[in-house]
Amino acid sequence: MSAEDILLEAEMAMEKSVDYMIHEFSSVRTGKASPALVENVDVEAYGSSMKLKQLALITTPEPRLLVVQPFDASTVRDIERALKESKIGIQPLVDGKLIRLPIPELSEERRKDLVKSLRQMAEEARVRVRANRRTAMDEAKKLEKNGEVTEDQLRDTEGEVQKLTDRFVKSIDEHLERKDAEVMKV
């Protein structure tokens, strides 16, 4: 493994950490209907646990309404039960073979709670990025210890890893700021 390989692996791992956080952010309710709010709800159907997106088509016909259309009408009750038990805080309305999820207006207190959870998700992403940095630094030190790179090359590699870390932490902060503004917007 070379110093370039270490940098490439570190960058890919940090990118995955940021992408995961962005995906987590998409499941946070902002007062607008988004299929991401419910697509990963676990549903007990056909004797096993499946994600809602595997069992139904999820659409947003209006800005404050989600419609869940099961592929198989026999799973309507299973999906309704899973949505009621989930922590999304939306009461499903069964309308024949459709399930409607009206998105209520967020209260100020609920918005503040959501911002707290967003900040927690962002901090977890920062921790993952820093863990990736630590792994890359350790790999670089092993190369230097084995005589594959010089002390100067080690210092350069560590500097590059730190630049990557700073770039991804800044990206996390920017995504948090945007999502924070989206949640707090009335």
Image (tube, helix red, strand yellow):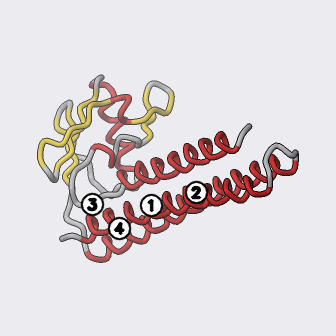
Q: Residue at x 50, y 47 (%)?
A: 15
Q: Residue at x 28, y 43 (%)?
A: 35
Name the disc covering residue 177, or none: 4
Q: Secondary structure at mark 1?
A: helix
Residue in front for this viewpoint, 148 or 51: 148
Residue in front for this viewpoint, 44 or 153: 153
How crowded pointer 3 is (Cα within 10 Å; few <14, some 14-19, many 20+) is rated as: many
Query: What percent of the width, then of the height, locates residue 25?
Result: 39, 55
Residue designated by label 3: 30
For marks 4 and 3 on the same chain, the one whose residue lies earlier in the sequence: 3
Q: Residue at x 22, y 48 (%)?
A: 101
Residue designated by label 1: 172
Q: Is residue 144 above or below residue 172?
A: above
How crowded pointer 1 is (Cα within 10 Å; few <14, some 14-19, many 20+) is rated as: many
To which quarter of the image does residue 52 belong? top left
Cβ–Cβ under 8 Å for marks 1 and 2: yes
Q: Residue at x 39, y 43 (%)?
A: 82
Cα gap from disc 3 to disc 1, whole angstroms:
18 Å
